[in-house]
Amino acid sequence: MKAQGVRIIAVEAGSLAWKTGLRADDLLLEINGEPVLDQLSYQFLISQRDRTHLKVRRPDGSLLQARLANGGEGIGLDLAADEVKVCRMNCVFCFVHQMPPGFRKSLYLKDEDIRLSFLYGHFTTLSSSDGAELDRIVRERLSPIHVSVHATDPQARVKVTGNPREGHILRKIDHLLEGRVDVHTQAVIAPGLNDGATWERTLAELWERRKQGPGGGVLSLSCVPVGLTAHREGLPEVASFTPEGAAAWIRRWEPEVRRRTRENGGEPWLLLADEWYTRAGIEVPGRSFYSRTWSQLENGVGLVRRFMEHTRGFLDRPRALGFRDRRLLLLTGASFAPILERAAARLNRAAGASVRVAAVRNRAFGDSVTVAGLLCGRDLLYAAHADREARPGPWVDAVVVPSASLRTHTGPTDQYTLRGARPRAEGTFLDDMTLAELAAQVGVPVVPGGEHFSHLLDHLRWIERQPLPADLARGFHTGGLNQPQGAYNP
Ligand code: SF4
């Protein structure tokens, strides 16, 4: 990894860095003799010692070296944003390849970055991680890392990922485990490609490496059914799981989840994504089926169960009466709609509310895409209009959209984005329609649903007091916002 340095974009007046003479446009090259690779590396290195040795290149090419007694604290530097890395894969089910044309540029970016994996739980295939980067993960203790394995059989992994150089994922995983880094893993399962014996081998080889002591280990393995959009022209044929196929998968692997949970000291290790259940039309299992810490929630494991648990607790509390006499339309994807409908019916009975649910067709990506996180503004608008037309007379007081369908791009993940991408604090859908634009066209307030009814109640109360916030994250709960594209999320 080359020490190119990171540009300083601002220095806090009066800070240690300021007093040392550091200024904007200086290039921070090294801290304590280690190359500064990015913001994460800076944070790690600056916190390592009480006294820090800096090496900086000035805009005129001269070198500045300084020793600071910072006590392991930050020194007042603001560093340039890191550009996200791009994967070297060509996966047969890659969501980016299946994007319809006409969306904003950043949605066509095949981002894959160990920094995002460490900070936000995004999965990486490690294709852009060479030996030096694996060493960096170990050195900076970026643990746990989230790795898309798909298959441990090298031939099968090459077939799935389309990269003949990336078959041996276990070599990279073992490198991390030997460095005492823990790993969460996932496999996206495509029928005929990496199910059957290939999946059994993947499961066995990762299970052998499960965390059992103080060293590095595999913390979990989730399996997720492949998701396909309607836009696969020119792409390899990939089958998807039918409802019967998903039900068969559940029958085969649910007992295995329970058996391995017992062998793993009561902590679930093998995880089945919610989408197996929503696809099969089978209710998700109880709380003990999921990790105590809800690990892999961002990957669509346990979201439905967690929502159901929240709902049960919420309806038992007087706070639920905050929904009394409210007339709401809740829009969501087809897979979550039946679950939300049952919850809304219970809320109506418990609180005297009039909450209805509409399953929104995904016209942008096709009917096969049923998750809420991939609904576009135009799809939601169409569904709201259709509902209004079907109901003459007084309509609803507010429309509720899934938080997972909104992006703000002003959170910490935006340090890792396309340079020049415009932050949209007000909240946009995938097609760039803003929440405010949707509300203007719908004619009633529109709010994000948050992660459960308690969040939703807060949001409704917010818009009763003031208009939509200019910065969505300042007015509403941020849970569920800014999900990675392709993520399953109700
Ligand atoms: S699925 Fe992920 S790793 Fe595979 S090609 Fe797409 S972006 Fe890259």
Image (cartoon, rainbow, N blue to C red):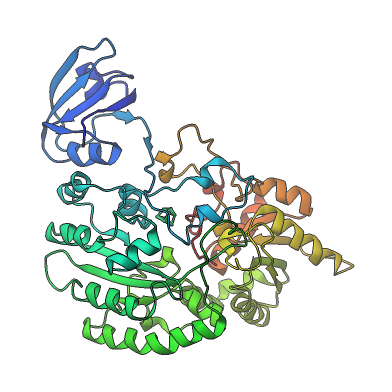
Which is nearer the eye, 423 or 123? 123
Which is nearer the eye, 316 or 384? 384
In the rendered image, the residue lying farthest to the right is 392
Residue 5 vertical position relative to residue 252 in the rendered view, above or below: above
Quarter assignment of residue 373: bottom right
Quarter assignment of residue 70: top left
Which is nearer the eye, 370 or 304? 370
Residue 183 point in image, percent of width and height? 25, 63
Residue 463 point in image, percent of width and height? 66, 53
Residue 261 point in image, percent of width and height? 28, 83
Residue 235 point in image, percent of width and height? 53, 58
Quarter assignment of residue 393: bottom right
Residue beneath the point at 11% across and 67% down: 214
Which is nearer the eye, 295 or 108? 108
Quadrant containing the C terminus is bottom right
Residue beneath the point at 66% across and 67% down: 367
Report whether 16 appears left or right of 387: left
Residue beneath the point at 48% across and 42% down: 410
Q: Is residue 55 visible?
A: yes
